[in-house]
Image: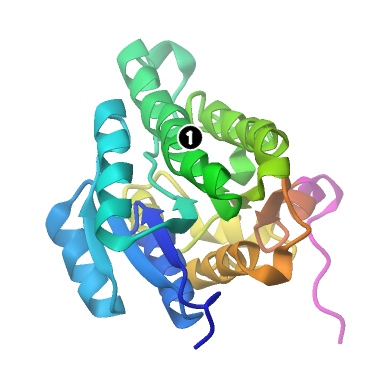
Amino acid sequence: MGAEQQRTALITGGASGIGEACAAALAQAGWRIIVSDLRAEAAEETANRLGGEALTLDVADADAIEAAAEAAERRFGPISGLVTSAGVLQPPTPPEAFSARDFDRVMDVNLRGTYLTAVAFGTRMARRGHGAIVTIGSVTSLRSVPLHAYGPSKAAVAALTQCLAAEWGRSGVRINCISPGYVATPPLQRAIDAGQRDPRALEEAAAMGRLVRAEEVGQVAAFLLSPSASAITGVNLPVDCGWLVGAHMGTYGGVPAART
């Protein structure tokens, strides 16, 4: 196993969903992984299953993030890969029914948490002259949706990614954003079960006619952290089964059926 494959990557929100899929893809690619999550037991279970390490972290706590970065590098050595997958969702809510407290919570975790985590680990990468970061955005940031905190928070993550890519490019640090579409994860299933999402409508809106699999997002994250993406920085890459190009096709009768 080469030196590049032995590099260490930390994944926030790594105990489940997209974060877990990113951790699994990186482990399969030969990275040493650190599964970081607010839920200590879940992080430990996922790390054990994937052959990695666990680190408890609340990305809404600025002091905890800096302490975690220091502790992680002291315990595991230099962190050269980072995926900032920790985030919170919100149900579709009219703005007049969405409290400022709930708005602030979404922004604190999704945007502020991404920023503080990227800065804590990215600054160390920049001082060493190498490293790569993947942030997790959302296609909901690219279209109008009734998610008046979540969508804007993810749009800000994409903008932040561009800012940091320019800031650290000459220091050997690349940073890119993945904007997943509707991914078949437990939170989406809970929303479906609660009647907040119609799975058929989500599938019909996508050009490929299906939901994204979490492992597909993980594979893209592993690519963007790898030497194969050595000239790519500052991009916002949708991984959405064509939801962005297909959603408006309802105006014209829907996405065309498969050719026969």
Q: Position of residue 46 (x, y in %)?
A: 25, 69
Q: Is residue 33 visible?
A: yes
Observer-nearest residue: 26 or 111? Answer: 26
Residue 165 picture quarter:
top right
For image coordinates 34% across by 51% down, the residue present is: 13
* Label 1 crowd (10 A; few <14 / some 14-19 / many >=20): some
Q: Which residue is mark 1?
A: 119
Q: Position of residue 190 (x, y in %)?
A: 32, 53
For image coordinates 45% across by 74% down, the residue present is: 31
Q: Position of residue 177 (x, y in %)?
A: 62, 47
Q: Is residue 185 visible?
A: no
In the picture, measured across the screen, residue 186 lies left or right of residue 255, that is left
For image coordinates 47% across by 43% down, the residue present is: 124
Residue 230 picture quarter:
bottom right
Instruction: Determine whether 121 is above or below 223 in the image.
Output: above
Magenta span covers which residues?
A: 248-260
Instruction: Determine whether 180 is above or below 171 in the image.
Output: below
Q: How is the image coloured?
A: rainbow
In the picture, measured across the screen, residue 234 lies left or right of residue 132, that is right
Q: Is residue 123 a member of the stretch shown in magenta?
A: no
